[in-house]
Image: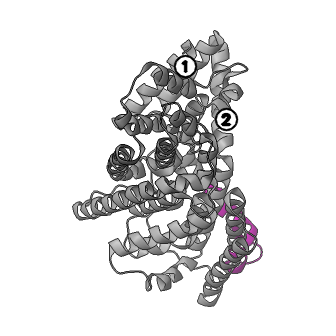
Amino acid sequence: MGIVSIAYMLMTAVMLVMIIRKKEITLAGVLAILIVGTVFTGNPVRGVVVLCSAITAGMSEMLPIFIGISLIVSMTIALKQTNADRYISYVTRYFPKSIGGVYFTIGIFMLAASFMIWPSPAVALIGALMIPAATKAGLPPVYAASSMSIFGYGLALSGDFLIQGVPSITAKGAGFECQDLMVYLVPLWIVMSVTTVVSAFILMRVGVKKGAIKCTAPNTDEKITPPCGNKRLKLIMLLTFLIFLAAIIAMMIMDIKGDDATALISGTALICTCIAGVIAYPKKEAPEKVLGFLVEGFQFSMKVFAPAIVIIGFFSMGNAEFSSQILGEGAPGSITEFVSYIREHISVPKPILPVFLAAIGFIYSIDGSGFAGLTVIGEVANSFGLGAEGVKLLTALGQIVIIWVGGGTIIPWSMIPVASVCGVDPYDIAKKNLKPVCIGFAATVAAAIVILCVKCL
């Protein structure tokens, strides 16, 4: 392992310790990029160039999501400032009366949408249509965000049983077909999902009873004078609902998924923002009002995204896909080098391999991308000398760990889309999710050990 990778992993360890101790890590991220950049280039001036390149890479990676979330927030602001959002109260009549019921309602809708179109567009859709109603029904925004991240980026993405993009990538890396993993992926997914959801629900109830809620959501009790009559406000909400319904139908009919679905929802939100401004305000005021909504939406999103851009830039440096773009030609993939090193120098008893592989999956996921380690986790599983069934089991376990860690449940900078839509701090969501997800990992790894010992050794 080279000196650059050693420097990178040392900085990573420092930053992870700071995260665990709940310290702000933006300044540490800047210093870490400078150190790794200087070590690789051998020139502190070039290290400063690397700093800017890393931030640029971090922003470019987040740009589509940033624009989409900004447009969703702009629409939410438009509905609030025109006072059209008061008719969301009609939707809350159909919500369960208990906080637990609302929590599961949000989660189940998020799960269903994420299975069909993946979590990122589902966040935009659920956030635009259901989060205001859920908040008015009494669910604190931070727990709404927790429910969305666990059910969408955890349950739905780690299985991905409908689209099957995630298991296909994982299986290909291990030399299998997607269906070959299902015999082990399904039971491990069930253990992880049930354990995590139950734990999260119990901790949510305890947190609500203790009043342990910290969020940055705006005050929804602010009284606003409507700029137009009730008929126009009802028309705005009706058109918003119908336009989003048309977008959903179009996604299903035209099989629009992933980034295209996110773009469709974001564009739909922009159209609804314009409609709200045009209907609610006089012709001369409407263009300026719409511009104001967009400016506020982008300002809000930038406040949430900005602290994470440096962190994303740093962790992208360790990803083999981005390292040469940031550091320059010949840059190593530090995370891959580190994993290869510990595989070659650490001997692990076969019954404990699930624990070892879960740790490797965590390391591959710290950049928060959710997909970086999927292509190689099968190769790692193959390197332990197990039979085909053992490799399938470990590969399925690796997929679950990688997605739950880096996909958007416990790495703060991977939860920015959910945080932006719900108006909460991503670190607050990570704190709410950390315990239940860790409990789920413990149960899932234990289940993998049992299956490995009974069926694969």
Main SS of the magenta part reads: helix
Residue found at x 45% / y 21%: 10
Residue found at x 66% / y 42%: 61
Give the magenta range: 274-299
The relative height of residue 73 versus residue 393 in the rendered view (above or below) is below
Which residue in the structure is indicated by mark 2?
57
Q: Is residue 118 magenta?
A: no
Find residue 12 and report its horizontal and vertical position in percent. 47, 27
Provide the secondary structure element on which disc 2 rests. helix
Find residue 368 and report its horizontal and vertical position in percent. 53, 42
Residue closer to the observer: 47 or 370? 370
What kind of residue is marked 2? Ala
Seen in the image, is 184 located left or right of residue 312? Answer: left
Which residue in the structure is indicated by mark 1?
5
Seen in the image, is 219 located left or right of residue 252? Answer: left
The relative height of residue 314 versus residue 161 in the rendered view (above or below) is above
N-terminal-most mark, 2 or 1: 1
Find residue 385 and report its horizontal and vertical position in percent. 49, 31
What kind of residue is marked 1? Ser
How was this image coloured?
one colour
Residue closer to the observer: 259 or 235? 259
Query: What quarter of the picture does the N terminus occupy?
Result: top right
Q: Is residue 77 visible?
A: no
Q: Is residue 284 magenta?
A: yes
Dividing the picture into quadrants, the one containing residue 20 is: top left
Circle 2 residues within 10 Å: few <14, some 14–19, many ≥20:
many
Query: What quarter of the picture does the C terminus occupy?
Result: top left
Circle 1 residues within 10 Å: few <14, some 14–19, many ≥20:
many
For marks 2 and 1, give the CA distance: 19 Å
